[in-house]
Image (cartoon, rainbow, N blue to C red):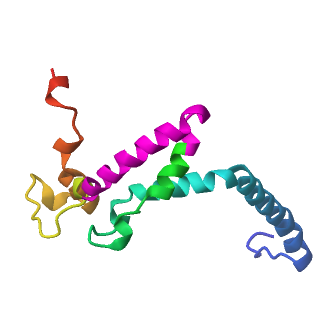
Amino acid sequence: MVGLPATLTTSSEDYLQNPTTKYVDSLTENIENRFSESLPILTAFQIFDPMGVPARSDDAFKEYGIPQIKILADHFYEEKKVKELTEELECEWKKFKYNFPSIFLIPQKQEFNYPGSDRMGTSTHVILTINVPALHAPPSLHR
């Protein structure tokens, strides 16, 4: 009997959905258990989003990123050196955050006149307008 539509009874549908639901619930629980301790570390990396840096004139700018830097230092540095290296990292972060947004953000009213720019997507424009010299090694390392 070709051409008859396939139909599922309620009991057949429940029979098929029950293992799938159990599998998805179990998988979700296992992922949460495995990575729950990683969430603070992954969340701390948000400080490197240039769009999240407050304006220098904002009161929040002074303390921006300090708690996250401490989380990252505690995770990545050896236990016996954490305090010393965390202090050093905090000092570096306080300087870095002044330059960080200007390195990666595009000036708002910049015209794009690259060869083939009429065929490029927005992300390509972003990549091409990153302040590349700021990311390069010092001239003494160039050969």
Q: Quadrant of the C terminus?
A: top left
Taking 11 as reference, is 135 left or right? Answer: left
Q: Quadrant of the N terminus?
A: bottom right
Taking 100 as reference, is 142 left or right? Answer: left
Location of residue 56 in the rendering, given as x and y in whole percent from the top left corner: 27, 67
- Taking 81 as reference, is 86 above or below it? below
As rendered, which of 2 and 27 lies closer to the eye?
27
Main SS, magenta residues: helix
Q: Is residue 129 magenta?
A: no
- Identify the residue at horizontal 49%, vertical 38% (top origin): 84
Location of residue 34 in the rendering, given as x and y in whole percent from the top left corner: 72, 49
Taking 62 as reference, is 16 left or right? Answer: right
Residues drawn in magenta: 74-101
As rendered, which of 93 and 143 lies closer to the eye?
93
Q: Is residue 98 magenta?
A: yes
- Identify the residue at horizontal 24%, vertical 57% (top origin): 126
Location of residue 77 in the rendering, given as x and y in whole percent from the top left corner: 54, 37
- Taking 54 as reference, is 90 above or below it? above
The residue sitting at the right extreme is 11
- Identify the residue at horizontal 12%, vertical 70% (top origin): 109
**Quadrant location of residue 28?**
bottom right
- Taking 55 as reference, is 10 above or below it? below
- Identify the residue at horizontal 28%, vertical 54% (top origin): 100
